[in-house]
Image (cartoon, rainbow, N blue to C red):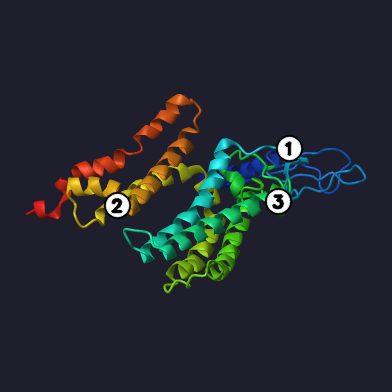
Amino acid sequence: MFLKILFVHLLIYAVFGSGSAFKESKSFHYEKGVVSAESHCPGHYCGRTKLENGSYSACGACERGLRRNNRSTCEECNDQPEFYDALYLGFMGLLPLTLHLRYIDLVTYLSTFTKKALIQYASAILEVTVAAVITLLVTEPYGSFNIRSCRVRRLADWYPLLYNPNPNYEGVLHCTQEAVYPLYSMVFVFYTLCLLAMVVMRAILPSILRVARPENEVPFNAALYFLPALIVIHAVGAGLIYYSFPYMVIILSVISSAAHFAFQLDQSMYRLLVGCVRDFRNLIILLGHWGLHAYGIIAITQLTEGVLHASYCALVPLPALFYILTSRFTDPANIS
């Protein structure tokens, strides 16, 4: 019995005694409050702002447009967006434009473009273009198409809210900030301006051009839903989209291209091939899919090897050609 009691005591000491010793040895030491010189802060995003009197503030979130350096001091971000960042912003701009054109096409499903349809297409393109230009102009440096940014280093940079430290379990330091300034916030500005531009343009454009307003308001009503949806998706999944959008573009463009061909009534190889050339609407849609496919290839390769990676764009027509050449084998009539 004595041996059993001794064993239990030793076990309790090994678990709780060594655990507390481990916590004590691993405790994080940092200077709290205002300090006179640069001092390290816990976490990945907590930093100190230099005050007017030369001292440094307590550890916390850096102001907008600032990010902490290796010495935990908040300094201004003066990086230029990389080529991949520009492609990401282009993708976020193509999303509302593609959805606008898609819903307009669903309403005006015609082989030839009418005047009303062309006006709606032009209005959608103008709305997105105006919103993109204004977004660039109101982003620092103001009035310029250049962007001053904080470089993206890791996926966690998009979600600093999840990395607020709790040193020594004494209390959480709230250091949430835009670590990828301004790639996160400017997309919200862009989508908001898209919504405002759509309301204004589609209200005044018909009267300026002296044409009747479209009888079907489906494209307008759809935009009132998908633009807020895009805002929510960006708020939650911006980091995941940033790293995966090239593959999303390629996969979705291939699926969309196949769906476009699948809706053709005559699935013979000859009709599908001739329809891509003779039907102006089909030709425009096909070229749009090819453009998106090429955009995805460029985003993946980033053209780091110049001519070699650019030559990959020659593979863009292959998915459409594959569908056309194999359409006769997938005809449901052949199953029986």
Q: Is residue 47 left or right of residue 260?
A: right
Q: Quadrant of the C terminus?
A: bottom left
Q: Amino acid at mark 3?
A: Cys
Closer to us: 230 or 128: 128
Label 2 sits on residue: 279
Label 1 sits on residue: 69
Mark positioned earlier in the residue sequence (3 or 2): 3
Q: Whole-percent x and y of residue 44?
A: 67, 42
Measured Cα–Cα span from mark 3 to mark 1: 14 Å
Q: Whole-percent x and y of residue 305?
A: 48, 25
Closer to us: 114 or 222: 114
Residue at position x 77%, y 40% from top?
Answer: 75
Q: Is residue 43 left or right of residue 307?
A: right
Question: Residue 175 bears which disc, if any?
Answer: 3
Closer to us: 301 or 276: 276
Q: Whole-percent x and y of residue 217?
A: 45, 72
